[in-house]
Image (cartoon, grey):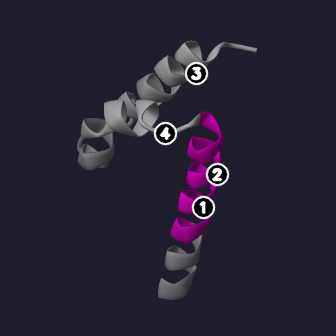
Amino acid sequence: MPGYEERVRLKRAGLQALPQERYPHLVEMAGPLAGAMAPELYDTFGVDLVLAGIEALAGRR
């Protein structure tokens, strides 16, 4: 299992790899989003964010 620094680097790289034209704010905030949170909070925040997105999309249909 990679250490904390490696996980932060991978998370930052993943966010920066998103399509800039579709997700400009996420790409711009990749550094703070990946490095500013404790690993446990980052993981639960990510799950909460995905679920909120699914709920928002489902509400539009």
Question: What residue is rendered at 33% in x and 30% in y?
Answer: 31
What amino acid is labelled 1 in the image? Answer: Asp
Question: Is disc 2 surrounded by few (<14), some (14 to 19) or many (20+) residues within 10 Å?
Answer: few
What amino acid is labelled 3 in the image? Answer: Arg
Question: What residue is rendered at 58% in x and 76% in y?
Answer: 55
Place of residue 32 in the rendered image (x, y in percent of width and height, measured from the top left): 34, 36
Q: Nearer the viewer, mark 4 or mark 1?
A: 4
Q: Is residue 45 left or right of residue 24?
A: right
Rendered view: 33 above or below 53? above
As for residue 26 lying within the magenta part, the answer is no
Disc number for residue 48: 1
Q: Is residue 43 left or right of residue 30?
A: right
Rendered view: 23 above or below 54? above
At mark 4, the secondary structure is loop
Tag 4 residue: 37
Question: Is disc 4 surrounded by few (<14), some (14 to 19) or many (20+) residues within 10 Å?
Answer: few
Q: Between marks 1 and 2, how big is the CA–CA gap?
A: 6 Å
Place of residue 29 in the rendered image (x, y in percent of width and height, measured from the top left): 29, 40
Q: Earlier in the sequence, mark 4 or mark 3?
A: 3
Q: Are marks 4 and 3 in contact (CB under 8 Å)?
A: no
Q: Between marks 4 and 3, how big is the CA–CA gap?
A: 12 Å
Q: Are marks 1 and 2 in contact (CB under 8 Å)?
A: yes
Tag 3 residue: 7
In this rendering, does residue 28 appear at all?
yes
Q: Which range of residues does the magenta coloring cover? A: 39-53
Q: Between marks 2 and 3, how big is the CA–CA gap?
A: 15 Å
Place of residue 18 in the rendered image (x, y in percent of width and height, measured from the top left): 38, 36
At mark 2, the secondary structure is helix
Where the N terminus falls, by quadrant? top right
Q: Earlier in the sequence, mark 2 or mark 3?
A: 3
Q: Nearer the viewer, mark 2 or mark 4?
A: 4
Q: Between marks 3 and 1, how big is the CA–CA gap?
A: 19 Å
